[in-house]
Amino acid sequence: MNKSPESRIKELREIINKHNYNYYVLSDPKISDFEFDALMKELQSLETAYPEFADPNSPTERVGSDLSKDFELVQHHYPMLSLGNTYSEGEVRDFYERTVRSLNESFEIVAELKYDGTSISLIFEKGILVRAVTRGDGTKGDDVTANVKTIRSIPLQLFGAGYPDLFEIRGEILLPWTEFERLNKEREVQEEPLFANPRNAASGTLKLQNPTVVASRKLDAYFYYLLGEDLPFDTHYANLEAARSWGFKIPDVIRKCTSLEEIFAYLTYWDKERKNLPVATDGVVLKVNSLRQQKNLGFTAKSPRWAIAYKFQAERAVTRLNLVSFQVGRTGAITPVANLEPVQLSGTMVKRASLHNADIIAGLDLYIGDQVFVEKGGEIIPKIVGVDTDSRSIQIGEKVRFIKNCPDCGTPLIRAEGEAAYYCPNEEGCPPQIKGRIEHFVTRKAMNINIGPETVEDLYNAGYIQTPADLYTLKTNDLLRLERWAEKSAENFRKSIDASKQVPFERVLFALGIRYVGETVAKKLAYVFHNINCIGKATIEQLMGVDEIGDRIAQSVVTYFSSLKNKELVTRLTEYGVQMCLSEDALAERSDKLVGKSIVISGTFSKHSRDEYKQMIEQHGGKNVSSVSRKTDFILAGENMGPAKLEKAEKMGVKILNEGDFLKILEK
Ligand code: IVH
């Protein structure tokens, strides 16, 4: 007999959860990606057909789709403390001996790796993930549940039984090295600032407003600490093992030690071996195993007395500073780069190091020819952390000072108040800025025109292009005069220029390269103002009225459109057929009926799916947020609205609308 849709949905969720676990936690997939996708598709279509069986913890929810600007600040039930840190084996010995004296009985120490990401606390009720909170200030953190749900190695629903009805589990959210490198390559192409290390990338990602982007970044999470009134075992180690059986990724490198020798052996082994791990680590954490003994040892104001973190020394090398060069980006920002005598560091040859900004340079008091200390503590771009002043000779070179004029066009640099970076203001005449803007204009996510930076350089040097608009008037003969160009490539170029005229307005707006107007902001501006003229005429106040647009972006947009050259560029692009307003279709589906409204969706619906409601809210200018707060305008409630949400809404006096009421608002 065929299964009922409800039981098949349930079964599929269990099967998929298990396969997710095999793949993301155990790294041991049992079925092909193709088979996995087929299961997901089956579940997705059943859930769409039977929305009454929707479940916020279904594996289909992991793609993340709700937009929430404000994270709700929530109180930690148990404060999130930090650990006492040390870099010295002597202090590890002191910690051990102190523990011997304080406990006056035998004890075990659990040695674990210290993962270098961003900490997270998950709350599980009856085996279901109900909330994920960042560390925040240790007592209150941000509720980032929607984002955390996109992390595939985090179980949304636990396996087996034996877990307490209510508990917290803490761990570290990490961006694996390979993902970190991929992300930074992508950002380099987009001229977006690079993440200095996977830790910053992980915490930045976790705080993004759009869970769909979070989902695309492939975060991972390792867990190391359980809290609750009725944990199953009386040792830390046994509880972690239990948590592993419920589906959490508990590192399998944790070890029980009963002597200082074993502890030191663990430190020495992992100081080397950690370089082969897929994620960043920066030390070892030592914890007293017995929960009773932990309780006896207690806490100081800041950290537990039953644990200590031993940090690995960041790898460091000494080399000669040959030169400091200054690069100009497409927005005119100046980046100082140290050129070094090549030196081996953490397995790679280092020739360049970041000097970040003028303040860092001034703080280092650098001279050309100095012997400098270079570190690569999890950073992709090594940095100079100090100068060996003792080795400075009399023949030392010049003092390194931040430049006052643009290295390319000579224009005096400016620095906006409160900003670390200097800019070259000669937007219209500074070659790297001109070329950079054209390179940005043609990228895949912008106009997707089929040429790379080398061609832009050649075309610019040959005097054929000065602005992105010139691409549209290039003659085939001009192209053929360049090296590496033939009929075929010229034709491909023509085709991609033609295709670019169909690129939707929001991408055109992004392609213009207005400072601080990335893809998301461009979309928002396009949907609120509909066309380039309205954006160009908008005042700072009107721009700041748009969700997520603050004074920095608003000011930048106004400045952009106050330039005659920019206005001319827009006019020319319009003449050539580039889209300067939202398409009829995009417009027909939109209104501003919900502008400024913050809306929570809860329960299951019969007329549209949850995702469709989310989309409608956005299309009509509203904001879908995940949790009820005083700022919520109303709750769109279906059947079986969560009791916690209902109670909160009633307490805060937030309006509750049903499907019918909501659709009526849109019809009006
Ligand atoms: S235990 C009360 N174990 O290091 C102590 N923390 O400075 C709870 N961390 O905030 C933390 N790996 O973000 C613990 N194996 C590990 C860890 C670890 C990384 C982080 C965590 C914590 C910080 C403490």
Image (spheres, helix red, strand yellow):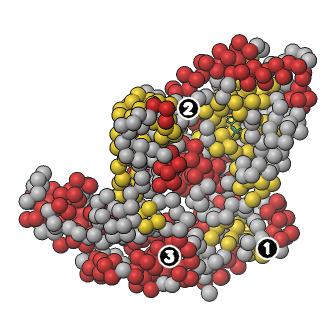
- On screen, residue 624 above or below 322: below
**What residue lies at 73% left-to-right and 45% top-to-bottom?**
121
Please, what secondary structure does the residue beneath circle 2 have?
A: loop
Between the residue at mark 2 and the residue at mark 1, the CA separation in whole angstroms equals: 51 Å
**What residue lies at 72% left-to-right and 52% top-to-bottom?**
136
Q: From the image, tell me which residue sits under label 2.
A: 314
Q: Kindly identify the amino acid type of the residue bearing the numbered disc 3.
A: Gln
Quarter of the image where one finds residue 441: bottom left
Instruction: Of the two numbered discs 2 and 1 on the same chain, state the one appearing first in sequence.
Output: 2
Q: From the image, tell me which residue sits under label 3.
A: 555
- The spot of residue 407 in percent (x, y) is 31, 58
Quarter of the image where one finds residue 568: bottom left
Please, what secondary structure does the residue beneath circle 3 have?
A: helix
Horizontal arrangement in the rendering, residue 402 relative to residue 108 (left or right): left
Q: Is mark 1 within 8 Å of ligand 1?
A: no
Tally of numbered discs: 3
Other residues around mark 3 within 10 Å, as few (<14) / some (14–19) / many (≥20): some
- The spot of residue 347 in percent (x, y) is 43, 27
Other residues around mark 2 within 10 Å, as few (<14) / some (14–19) / many (≥20): some
**What residue lies at 70% left-to-right and 18% top-to-bottom?**
263
Contact flag, marks 3 and 2 (Cβ < 8 Å): no
Q: Kindly identify the amino acid type of the residue bearing the numbered disc 1.
A: Val
Q: Nearer the viewer, mark 2 or mark 1?
A: 2
Q: Quadrant of the C terminus?
A: bottom right
